[in-house]
Image (tube, rainbow, N blue to C red):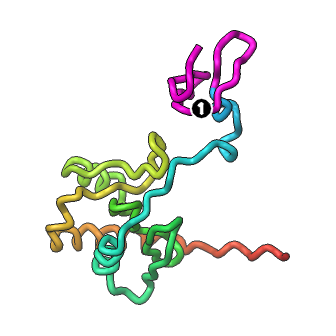
């Protein structure tokens, strides 16, 4: 019988939690494994420090259609309503074409995974070392903007009546 904090396994989900209940087969599946995704506990959202936020603001392109706004305690830059770059804790991610994503990953970047194991399509985390290479980073940020600016503008959803 698994104890608190030991691995439990149900279907495709393996977890390490203390929410164990015995099922009919004698196992102790995690309650979260049987819940809908909306009710499962989420990992803590990483937050950037002030220096990282300042760094982000310094690399956002100066373009009239670009705006920066908060996203889940982090910052993101948008063009025509489409997010094209952002922070996730200390990580800087960009929206790029598949070919450009492959180049960034080859240079040491990685997939952007706000939830472990679930990469966000179209986005890639840039290598940490690029923070010390402003020209290289600026080139890739500009490519991200160029990629996103041609996307169809996002239409804001109508506000719900209260």
Q: What residue lies at 15% left-to-right and 67% top-to-bottom?
A: 132
Residue drawn at x 39%, y 52% is 112
In the image, 14 versus 26, the foreground residue is 26
Q: Residue furthest bottom?
A: 64
Residue 108's x, y, as percent?
21, 50
Above-or-below relation of 33 to 78: above
Q: Secondary structure at mark 1?
A: loop
> Left or right: 28 with respect to 138?
right
Q: Is residue 162 left or right of residue 119?
A: right
The image position of residue 148, as x and y in percent, is 42, 69
Q: Nearer the viewer, residue 1 or 159?
A: 1
Residue where numbered disc 1 is placed = 18
Vertical comparison of 44 with 137: above or below: above
Q: Position of residue 97 (x, y in %)?
A: 36, 58
Residue at far right of view: 162
Looking at this view, is 28 or 133 the one in front?
28
Q: Is residue 159 left or right of residue 152?
A: right
Residue 126 lies within the magenta run: no
Q: Is the C terminus in the top left, top right, bottom left or bottom right quadrant? A: bottom right
Residue sitting at x 59%, y 13%: 1
* Residue 21, image quadrant: top right
> Which image quarter: residue 57?
bottom left
How many numbered marks does the figure carry? 1
Q: Main secondary structure of the magenta part?
A: loop
Residue at far top of view: 25
Splitting the image into 4 quarters, where does residue 41 fall? top right
Q: Which residues are magenta?
A: 1-29
Horizontal arrangement in the rendering, residue 71 relative to residue 89 (left or right): right
Reply yes or no: does residue 11 show up in magenta.
yes
Label 1: few (<14), some (14–19) or many (≥20) C-alpha neighbours in 10 Å = some
Could you say where residue 32 lies in the image, as x and y percent from the top left?
Answer: 65, 35
| Residue appearing at x 41%, y 61% in the figure | 88
């Amino acid at each position: 019988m698994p104890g608190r904090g030991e691995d439990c396994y149900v279907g495709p989900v393996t977890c390490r939690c203390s929410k164990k209940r015995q099922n009919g087969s004698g196992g102790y599946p995690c309650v979260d494994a049987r819940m809908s995704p909306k009710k499962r506990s989420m990992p803590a959202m990483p937050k950037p420090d002030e220096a990282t936020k300042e760094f982000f603001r310094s690399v956002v392109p100066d373009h009239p259609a670009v705006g920066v706004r908060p996203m889940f305690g982090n910052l993101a830059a948008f063009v025509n309503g489409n997010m094209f770059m952002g922070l996730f804790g200390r990580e800087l991610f960009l929206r790029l074409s598949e070919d450009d994503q492959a180049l960034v990953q080859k240079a040491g970047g990685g997939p952007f995974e706000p939830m472990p194991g679930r990469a966000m399509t179209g986005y890639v985390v840039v290598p940490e070392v690029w923070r010390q290479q402003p020209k290289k980073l600026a080139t890739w940020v500009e490519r991200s903007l160029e990629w996103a600016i041609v996307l169809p503008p996002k239409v804001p959803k109508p506000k719900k009546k209260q």
